[in-house]
Image (cartoon, helix red, strand yellow):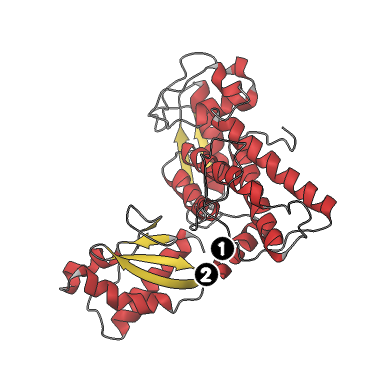
Amino acid sequence: MTPVELSRTVLCAVRRAVDQGELSVAVPARAVVTAPGPGGRGDYATNIALQLARPAGRPPRQVAEILRPHLSRTEGVADVEITGPGFLNIHLDGTAATALVRSVQQGAYGHSDALQGEVVELRIPYDVRAEVVADALVRIIATQGGRVEVEHTEPVNLRPVPAPEDPAPLGLDAARWALLHPATHDRPRITADHLVQRASNPLFRVRYAHARARALHRNAAALGFTSIPGDVRDLPPAQGSPRDLSCASAPPSHHPLLTALAEYPRALTQAAAHRAPDRVARQLVSVADALLLFQHTVLPRGDEKPSAAHRARLALAEAAGTVLVGGLSLLGIDAPEHL
């Protein structure tokens, strides 16, 4: 279940409470669903009860208590807790992970009709960074059903901060990353840091994570098993840093890899709406870092036989690799299978 789907679920819970006379409010157009903040629990949290408290004429925690059973009865939701002044903390069950992985497997993950039928006119200056940003936006906006027309004319409506020097010496992939990873209002760095094969380089981490996903697929085949989407909640807590590519660790109970994958559709939608391909680049880094922590849990160790858990973890790793290669493709960057 992605945050977008969970947002719709929260709104449905509000609508049921209103229809049953438990709340007297106008159902909002949008419910914000994010990862839990400090003191929060579960996979996701929403402040919808705080948002509705004043129009409902009730304390936020009372609104949360009204909404809690409606959310708890939703398929894919294992439990709902109330924390702080009235935050609803949502725990997803194993079917949520299965559904997310299958959604990625079906293709076109993150594509929507948010901009269906819209023609977006991009008027850009004759500048290499503007050209690269516009080129990426053509593909990103297409994932949301829109179409882009790029013109070099005044008045300009897309003017990223120009690169301080020619990025061509970095090579095509590193040059594009150097121009797309920073926000358009930030000055890009055209340095050799984008070429180093170390964890300090975000581009390397993204491409390396994709290569690791492909290696896991090959190694599993050599061991005689393939992936099957399933429950991955049985993992131990994570240790180490996502930048430590050698640490044998696993994600914590809220599964940052599932969270990062679930956030990818929102990143695509926001990148298209705000003309900001950097949002896609940063989300790819989040997916890569989570996968690099997760990878050590996928294959059996020693005399251990492949189990349903290994097949489910492999499916999740493969889904992450699919998202990474798809996202890099939108940015016009190659994703090698061996690195």
Disc ID at residue 78: none
Q: Is residue 277 above or below residue 91?
A: above
Residue occupied by mark 2: 93
Separation of residues labelled 1 and 2 (CA atoms):
8 Å
Query: Within 10 Å of the Cα at label 2, are there few (<14), some (14-19), or many (20+) other Cα atoms?
Result: some
Q: How crowded is mark 1: few (under 14 residues within 10 Å), some or many (20 or more)?
A: some
Percent coordinates x, y for residue 314 in the rendering: 69, 55
Cβ–Cβ under 8 Å for marks 1 and 2: yes
Vertical placement of 73 versus 182: above or below? below
Q: Horizontal and vertical percent for residue 42? A: 42, 62
Element under disc 2? loop
Closest to the observer: 320 or 135? 320
Q: What residue type is labelled 1?
A: Arg
Quadrant housing residue 309: bottom right
Query: Which of the two discs, 1 and 2, sits closer to the camera?
Result: 1
Name the element at disc 1. loop
Question: If you read the primary sequence from the N terminus, does the residue marked by circle 1 or circle 2 appear first?
Answer: 2
Q: Where does residue 209 sit, x and y in percent of width and height?
A: 64, 40
